[in-house]
Image (cartoon, rainbow, N blue to C red):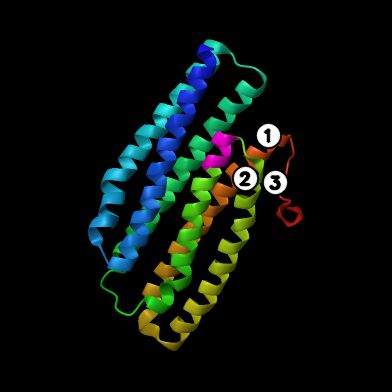
């Protein structure tokens, strides 16, 4: 029973971590809408150190659980998956910081609305994917996890549309070259966050159903 309580506590820590990363993405979205430098700075200076602390804490909890209780079966799969999700969340936080750092250089650039339409849609979908991927893990809901994996295609399509549009603007107006490259960099980081959410969804499906779907998105 104590082992089960520890695993429940571990899941709560992962939820807290995911909420922090989701908040980092949300601040980046609001920063874009409002040209708010303070939100980007908060992601970089306050949220990233908290994310690093949580990553170390969860890593230690997973290690201690295995060493102390030597879980088997489902308990072991849950701990190992928690360890992997922890790593994925840390990488997502890094991508969010990359977005914030790049976005700081865009605050003074006027008339970026056309550049940002697909990027903002990507950010909204990605934020939802993160929330649902963690919910699917906590609830052991493979249907929700499968839906997360399917949404990765939406993000990929938006990035391709954004790339075409941005390159078109850059070719038409050389003055927008630097800003355009920054937008492409932000879109790439959002795509990577979506990929990491998809990784979590794939692992949940394996945990619940024992079905491996990696590299098989077209079959979903």
Q: Position of residue 79 (x, y in %)?
A: 56, 25
Q: Is residue 79 above or below residue 199?
A: above
Q: Earlier in the sequence, mark 3 or mark 2?
A: 2
Query: What span is colored magenta in the figure?
Result: 134-139
Q: Position of residue 150 (x, y in %)?
A: 64, 55
Tell me if residue 137 is in the magenta stretch.
Answer: yes
Crowding around mark 2 (Cα neighbors within 10 Å: few <14, some 14 to 19, many 20+) is many
> Left of 71 or right of it: where is 206?
right
Q: Quadrant of residue 36 in the image?
A: bottom left
Alpha carbon of mark 3 to alpha carbon of mark 2: how far? 13 Å
Q: Earlier in the sequence, mark 3 or mark 1?
A: 1
For the residue pair 176 and 127, the one nearer the viewer reads as 127
Q: Position of residue 2 (x, y in %)?
A: 50, 12
Check whether the beta carbons of the residues at disc 2 and disc 1 lie within 8 A of each other. yes
Alpha carbon of mark 3 to alpha carbon of mark 1: how far? 15 Å
Please name which of the two marks, 3 or 2, marks the residue nearer to the observer. 2
Alpha carbon of mark 2 to alpha carbon of mark 1: how far? 10 Å
> Left of 65 or right of it: where is 149?
right
Check whether the beta carbons of the residues at disc 3 and disc 1 lie within 8 A of each other. no
Q: Position of residue 29 (x, y in %)?
A: 37, 61
Q: Which residue is mark 2?
A: 145
Which residue sits at x=43%, y=66%?
120
Which residue sits at x=37%, y=39%?
51
Which residue sits at x=50%, y=79%?
165
Please name which of the two marks, 3 or 1, marks the residue nearer to the observer. 1
Q: Which residue is mark 3?
A: 214
Main SS type for the magenta part?
Answer: helix
């Amino acid at each position: 029973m104590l082992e089960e309580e520890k695993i429940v506590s571990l899941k709560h820590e992962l939820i807290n971590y995911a909420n922090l990363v989701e908040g980092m993405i949300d601040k980046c979205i609001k920063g874009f809408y409002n040209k708010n430098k303070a939100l980007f700075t908060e992601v970089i200076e306050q949220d990233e150190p908290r994310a690093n602390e949580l990553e170390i804490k969860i890593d230690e909890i997973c290690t201690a659980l295995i060493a102390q209780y030597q879980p088997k079966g489902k308990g072991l799969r849950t701990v190992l998956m928690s360890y992997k999700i922890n790593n994925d969340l840390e990488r997502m936080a890094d991508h969010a910081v990359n977005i914030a750092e790049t976005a700081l250089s865009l605050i003074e650039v006027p008339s970026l609305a056309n550049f940002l339409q697909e990027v903002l849609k990507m950010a909204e979908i990605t934020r939802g994917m993160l929330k649902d991927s963690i919910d699917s893990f906590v609830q052991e809901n493979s249907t929700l996890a499968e839906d997360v994996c399917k949404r990765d295609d939406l993000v990929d399509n938006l990035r391709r549309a954004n790339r075409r549009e941005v390159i078109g603007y850059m070719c038409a107006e050389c003055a927008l070259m630097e800003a355009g490259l920054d937008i492409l960099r932000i879109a790439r980081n959002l795509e990577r966050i979506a990929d990491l959410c998809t990784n979590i969804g794939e692992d949940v499906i394996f945990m619940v159903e024992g079905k491996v779907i990696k590299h098989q998105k077209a079959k979903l």
